[in-house]
Image: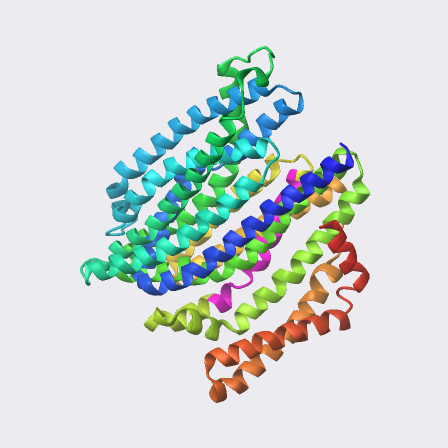
Amino acid sequence: MNERLKKNLVLQGSILAAAGLISKVIGFIYRIPMANILGNTGNGLYSVAFGLYNIALTLSSYSMPLAISKLMSARLAKGDKKNAHRLFHDALIFAVCTGLIASIALYKGAELFAKLYRKEGLEMPLRVLAPTVFVVAMLGCCRGFFQGHRNMVPTAVSQVIEQIVNAVVSVWAAAYFTNMAAGKNAAAYGAMGGTFGTLLGALSALILFMILFVARQLTIRTKDLGDMPAEDHRLLVKAVFLTVLPVIISQSIYQLGYTLDDFLFGNLMALKGVDQTTATDLQGVFNTQYNQMINLPTAIATAMASATLPSIVASHTKGEKDKVRAKTDTVIKVNMLIAIPSAIGLAVLAEPVMGVLFPRLGDMMDMAVTLLQTGSTAVVFYALSTLSTSILQGCDKMRLPVIHSGISLAFHVVIVAGCLYFTDLGVYALIIGNVSFPLLVCILNCRSIAALEGYSFKFKDAFVRPFAAACVMGVAAFVVYTVLKGLTGMLIAMVIAIVTAMIVYVIMLIAFKAVTVTELKHIIKRR
């Protein structure tokens, strides 16, 4: 691979990673006003509906961009444009079929899911999300087509446009339908309104690709595709299926964890005599306010893991184990420099974070604060589990993370079900499950990395020193916030505490020799 092509691939990958991170930030921002509009019950319905929607997406179309881009790029690399385009057409038909089946199943089964999950009104947002599955299936194929041509810009632009439309429409529609209901089943109507943003966001991105395809088609002639022998359509469809299957299995495990929690919580709380509205409110706080705060720093780790994978793949392919170990050292350390202070910061400033961002929590405010304080460590474990999964995949061990996730999910279900049924922990049982699942994945993944690559984790550099620096930071943030809260109010005290925490953390990193200037330059160069 020549140097120019390498630079182009790095640039394209960076564009896609940046777009993904921007989309996550937009998603975080718009969910704050929408969460306040929907209220606890509406958030509960919305989050459970999205858990089921994500399962439908995973089974039907989630992995299509990866499959199409991988299979097309392999053929285009050999100059076989004809079969690359034939594969895209066959994959499109495959996606139409799976997307349509999933959409119909979600629409027709909406009332059944509402009964199974003990969520009155759940069928309303599900029926809006049902056609969204079909639209996203088409969208995934379009993104895969351009990625197969090593052009990540359309995917990046479409992701940002999709999320912007989603944000604007979701907030507006949630408010409109909530007010329109005027108290009568307002939570269900509001949750349904919020899902319209997801549908219209996906449609807007699909329209962009339709315009791009029309423009592209005008410049392509049949003879430009070459005269390579045509591959059998059945073999092309089989190749697509075999490519998406491992991803479907892997992602299904993660998505099942979320929706199983919803199912277990709704039903086991009912067995213990908790009324449906209270259970839905509790799920709303856990799935929305708590998870939202946990997911943002985790998204940074996900973006970093995606950016790291090609570099580790290249070194592993060349048999350069020393470089694999060095890159693993660097990326784990940088990840923990972000994740550890995020976890401590969320725990220390849980009260103002929840109070400022989600003032409509009402009676649930104290519980939301406690959830964030007790469950913030999940940030570290999710960041490390995501990263370690990418490292194993980069070393051609695609099955290991799937197996580890499956084992963790089995333990997760037993722990959550046991805590819900045999104790009075209630929603705090979900916190135990949310922390234990990524923790076990981390342990299993890290053991495999050590065994496969002879890697030895540098706990002092990667964990102990950042933790020590973050602890000092946490104390400083807590003291500043506590002193200023009565003088300036919660918002100003929180802002000053966050700024203070950032300054103190950087100083402590240098003081504890957790990072050096040379390392920072090295990290930036690798990125």
- In percent of width and height, residue 475 lies at 61, 78
Q: Give the range drawn in magenta.
A: 372-393
- In percent of width and height, residue 350 lies at 49, 71
Residue shown at 50% from the left, 69% from the top? 373
Looking at the image, residue 390 sits to the left or right of residue 423; the answer is right
The one nearer the camera, 211 or 122, is: 211
Residue 89 higher or lower than 121, as above or below: above
Residue 41 higher or lower than 120, as above or below: below
Residue 429 higher or lower than 248, as above or below: below
Residue shown at 66% from the left, 41% from the top? 392
Q: Is residue 442 visible?
A: no
Q: Which quadrant of the structure image shows residue 148?
A: top right
Q: Is residue 374 magenta?
A: yes
Q: Which quadrant of the structure image shows residue 53?
A: top left
Looking at the image, residue 311 sits to the left or right of residue 255; the answer is right
Q: Is residue 62 visible?
A: yes
- In percent of width and height, residue 351 lies at 46, 74
Residue shown at 65% from the left, 56% from the top? 335
Residue 89 higher or lower than 392, as above or below: above
| Protein image colouring | rainbow
Residue shown at 40% from the left, 46% from the top? 201
Q: Most extreme residue toward the front, as rendered? A: 218
Q: Is the magenta stretch mostly helix, strand or loop?
A: helix
- In percent of width and height, residue 461 lies at 75, 61
Q: Is residue 480 magenta?
A: no
Q: Quadrant of the N terminus?
A: top right
The one nearer the camera, 161 or 109, is: 161
State the count of labels: 0
